[in-house]
Image (cartoon, rainbow, N blue to C red):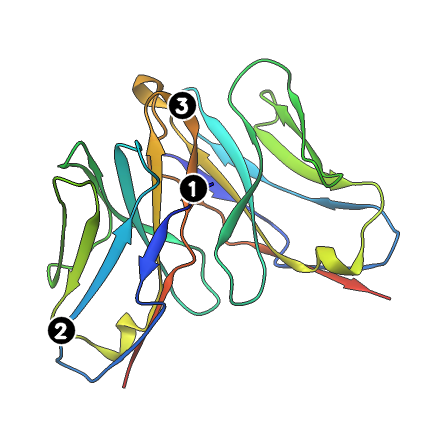
Amino acid sequence: AAGVIQSPRHLIKEKRETATLKCYPIPRHDTVYWYQQGPGQDPQFLISFYEKMQSDKGSIPDRFSAQQFSDYHSELNMSSLELGDSALYFCASSSRMDPGEAFFGQGTRLTVV
Amino acid sequence: AQSVTQLDSQVPVFEEAPVELRCNYSSSVSVYLFWYVQYPNQGLQLLLKYLSGSTLVESINGFEAEFNKSQTSFHLRKPSVHISDTAEYFCAVSDGYGGATNKLIFGTGTLLAVQP
């Protein structure tokens, strides 16, 4: 069965650079979520999209932006990177036709040096 | 606002012993409850979930959790653990508004360390 695909799996950037993370949800899933997991931390909700519209917003810095495209894939854009942005970024997808479970991707490990 | 509390940051246990990982939640609305497992350098995998109906839910690998509304708890149990169960376990809550899976609020995680 198809799963949530995230790319890249690993990314190394320097401070003040920009990074773009991509997420391809499970086919026919209409909702995408982004989470940030710092070292030794629990995942923190950043933002979500339903049918290409932002549906909820969490603790996402103003330096970050995200969108969901017509093919339902989503991108998280991160600018002016800081050392503290180093984390594992997860994307998850779900369907309102099958509530109760969000499927997670393997994550993108971002390291800012 | 919803929140999840996992009181134990680490639970050491010997192989084949029983284990309980505790989870308490707070919410003013009806909730969906989840346990996710994360192996080292891996993503989050759903272990089991409570949406409605029977308060006892089971996973395919021997874990079970019981939703207790009066105690606002959703503790995870396994009668006999294996070395391969060593992982970080996260309890999570979603408000299920509109019948959808909304954002998950995670607890701080419990490291289950199974020793031979």
The mark closer to the camera, 2 or 3, is: 3
**Disc 2 from disc 3: Cα separation:** 35 Å
> Could you tell me if the residues under marks 2 and 1 are in contact, i.e. CB atoms within 8 Å?
no
x then y, percent, for residue B43: 48, 56
**Would you place residue A11 above or below residue A113 in this image?**
above
Residue B1 picture quarter: top left
x then y, percent, for residue B38: 55, 56
**Disc number at residue A103?**
1
Identify which residue is drawn at 51% across, 61% down. B42
Tag 2: amino acid? Thr
Q: Residues within 10 Å of mark 2 (few under 14, many from 20)?
A: some
Choose between B31 and B99: the one closer to the eye.
B99
Is residue B94 in view?
yes
Q: Which chain carries label 2?
A: A
Query: In which quadrant will I find the C terminus of chain A?
Result: bottom left
Tag 1: amino acid? Phe
Residue B22 picture quarter: top right
Q: State the residue position of label 3.
A: A98
The mark closer to the camera, 2 or 1, is: 1
Marks 2 and 1 share the same chain = yes
Choose between A9 and A81: the one closer to the eye.
A9
**Disc 2 from disc 1: Cα separation:** 27 Å
Marks 2 and 3 share the same chain = yes
Q: Which of marks 2 and 3 is nearer the N terminus?
A: 2
Q: Residues within 10 Å of mark 1 (few under 14, many from 20)?
A: many
Identify which residue is drawn at 42% across, 46% down. A3
